[in-house]
Image (cartoon, grey):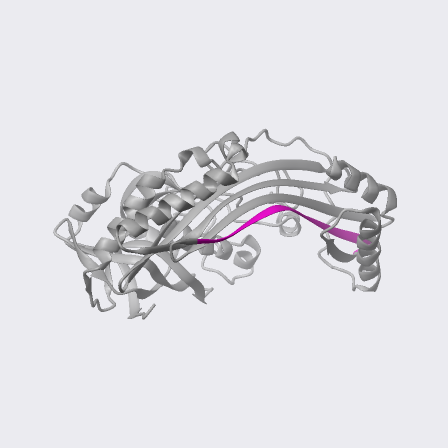
Amino acid sequence: MKTEKIIKFIREHCSADDYVCSISNIDSHETRFAQNGITQHIAGPKISIDLTVTFGKKSGTASVNQADDATLMQLISTAEDIAKLAPEDPEFMPSTGSCKLPQVQNCSQATLDLKPQEMVKIVQTSIDQARAMDATVSGMCEKHISDFCLFTKHGFIGSDRNSSFGHSMTLKKGEVETKVSYAAKDFSGFDLKKDFARLAAQAESLADMHSFDPQKIAVILRPAALQELLWYMFWMMNRRQSDEGFTPFTDQLGKSFFGEKFSLYSTLQKPQIISPPFTMDGLPTEECVWVENGVLKNMPTDRYWASKQNTKACTPYNMYIPGGDASEDEMMKMVPRGLIINRFWYIRPVDMKRGELTGMTRDGVLYFENGKVKNAVNNLRFNEIPHEMTRRILALGAEELASPYGLVPTILIDGFNFVDKTNF
């Protein structure tokens, strides 16, 4: 009801030639814990309203976090005042009109029904299990229900409700520290016993730490690590930057540029992951093939550049990478030696033209040899070019949830390029 009131107020009081307004209502519960104790529970709804108005080709944007009439009037007047003072935007695109949106189900009833008392119980169970192994655990158990609406002066209106549940645990025992996390739209898929067993196994493996020098070596990238790396590649696949010659994807559309074992999609067909029915540009989301069997099929393109190039605008709204049937045990037997990577972090571009990224491992690195895990090793820094990396895929495992927006497999990569040790 509050959303309908906001829409009505904006439509009645905004005098600009054009406008786009988004309304985000998020109801969250977050139970934080540290060193085997619950430290706080944060709960409650919050609203954010963003309005962009345009006079001719001059635009202004303002945001508020309240929905009373006086605040909405201030929102409108602030955005309009900014627009009147702004220079003309030579790439201005008018807002979109009404259209048919796909039917999606992004809200899990199990997540919706999850009570704070049950979240506290999950945390307490995590703490009890850590104490039982003479360790401490810290992290957060969280639930978010998000209602989002986008509407324009030209008649587009879309709304979506999505849910997410997450539980992260960082275990510390002596000098060993490691982490696991679960994040999905559906709470019913969460298995604390399984996640804590994985956490304890990681901690046990890391207790036997050996020094390892940087080198090119085979790696098993678990789903979270793969997703973290490829989101950065997605950003570099921008169609405009590529057409203008600033990325490695220049003149590669329609060509075999990735490894033939690699495909990448944004899809509405996988119920495990969130699939927004529309983009922030006010366009309906569609099935999008980015890479198929190594061939580059599409690149993210905004509305302005799509109009210039006479193509369709498209944006990555989730990540689906088809997997295979290889287990980790089978992967370890396919190469003489290698590393198992749980996560990456601090990923940054090194050379946008080449598509090179750097970053560091985290949450435990395991060394294997002759098909068996031998010991843990120190964290390492890598320099790697993701599209070239896909050409060295040796095997793919089953698809797993990496996040509420990612369904990807574990993969075995040959010759992953590590360049330095790290101390954290």
In the rendered image of this protein, does residue 285 appear above or below residue 256?
above
Magenta: predominant secondary structure element?
strand
- State left or right for residue 366 relative to residue 151: left
In the rendered image of this protein, does residue 26 appear above or below residue 236?
above
What is the number of callouts on the image? 0
- State left or right for residue 224 relative to residue 304: left
Q: Position of residue 65 (x, y in %)?
A: 71, 52
| Residue bounds of the magenta highlight | 38-57
Is residue 301 part of the magenta span, yes or no?
A: no
Residue 354 makes an appearance in the image? no
- State left or right for residue 193 relative to residue 290: left
- In which image quadrant can residue 211 be found? bottom left
Residue 358 makes an appearance in the image? yes
Q: Quadrant of the C terminus?
A: bottom left
Is residue 54 part of the magenta span, yes or no?
A: yes
The residue at 46%/38% (across/down) is: 118
Q: Nearer the viewer, residue 185 or 80?
A: 185
Q: Position of residue 320 (x, y in %)?
A: 43, 41
The residue at 45%/36% (across/down) is: 187
- In which image quadrant can residue 55 be found? bottom right
Q: Quadrant of the N terminus?
A: top right
Q: Position of residue 96 (x, y in %)?
A: 72, 41
Q: Residue furthest left?
A: 370
Q: Nearer the viewer, residue 153 or 205?
A: 205
